[in-house]
């Protein structure tokens, strides 16, 4: 009778050993999966924070139109609007403060005179040259305002 009891005990031990093995393998898989999820969360590329100095903010229209001489003696009557950065908009007190005249456009006006007077009437008739002039003016204004102005728009552009 002792052999039947021994056989039963051995079978129980085998079944218990298999259960323990399954539990260990299952726990190991859970740990590996959890580790993979954590590694993915930590190592995935993060979206960069937007830079307020490069994000567009308010557009400020310069009130006065300007008439300037072109290189060939003809005239250009223009009016400008400036796309400020979000940082410049915030520093100026927001869009409402800017709308009440909280922005000095004298540097932009001077840059327009300097930059646009280099072109002739015939050059500025071509849309491509006008776009190049606008890009050159935007670059110059950006430098004069130390990066606070992202782009210059022509709200009026009449040549004679």
Image (cartoon, rainbow, N blue to C red):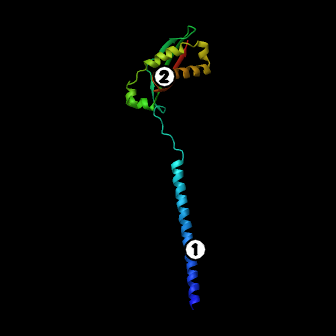
Figure label count: 2
> In the rendered structure, which disc, 2 or 1, sits on the residue that comes first in sequence?
1
How far apart marks 2 and 1 lie (CA) works out to 75 Å
Q: Residue at x 58, y 81 (%)?
A: 11
- Is 128 situated above or below 45? above
> Most extreme residue toward the top, as rendered?
73
- Is 139 situated above or below 56? above
Which of 140 and 75 lies nearest the eye of the viewer? 140
Q: For mark 2, does the 10 Å Cα neighbourhood hold few (<14), some (14 to 19), or many (20 or more) residues? A: some
Locate residue 93 relative to residue 33 in the image: left or right.
left
Dividing the picture into quadrants, the one containing residue 105 is top left
Dividing the picture into quadrants, the one containing residue 57 is top left
Q: Residue at x 51, y 49 (%)?
A: 42
Quadrant of the rendering where the C terminus is positioned: top right
Which of 94 and 13 lies nearest the eye of the viewer? 13
Instruction: Please give the residue where the numbered disc 2 appears in the rendered image.
Output: 143
**Residue 18 - label:** 1
């Amino acid at each position: 009778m002792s052999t039947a009891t021994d056989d039963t005990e051995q079978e129980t031990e085998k079944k218990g050993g298999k259960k323990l093995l399954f539990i260990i393998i299952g726990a190991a898989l859970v740990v590996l999966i959890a580790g993979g999820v954590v590694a993915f969360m930590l190592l995935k590329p993060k979206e960069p924070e937007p830079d307020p100095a490069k994000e567009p903010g308010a557009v400020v229209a310069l009130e006065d139109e300007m008439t300037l001489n072109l290189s060939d003696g003809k005239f250009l009557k223009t009016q400008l609007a400036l796309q400020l950065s979000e940082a410049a908009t915030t520093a100026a007190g927001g869009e409402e403060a800017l709308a009440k005249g909280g922005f000095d456009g004298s540097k932009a006006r001077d840059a327009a005179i300097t930059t646009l007077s280099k072109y002739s009437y015939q050059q500025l008739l071509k849309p491509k040259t006008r776009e190049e002039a606008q890009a050159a003016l935007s670059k110059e204004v950006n430098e004069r305002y130390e990066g606070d102005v992202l782009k210059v728009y022509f709200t009026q552009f009449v040549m004679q």
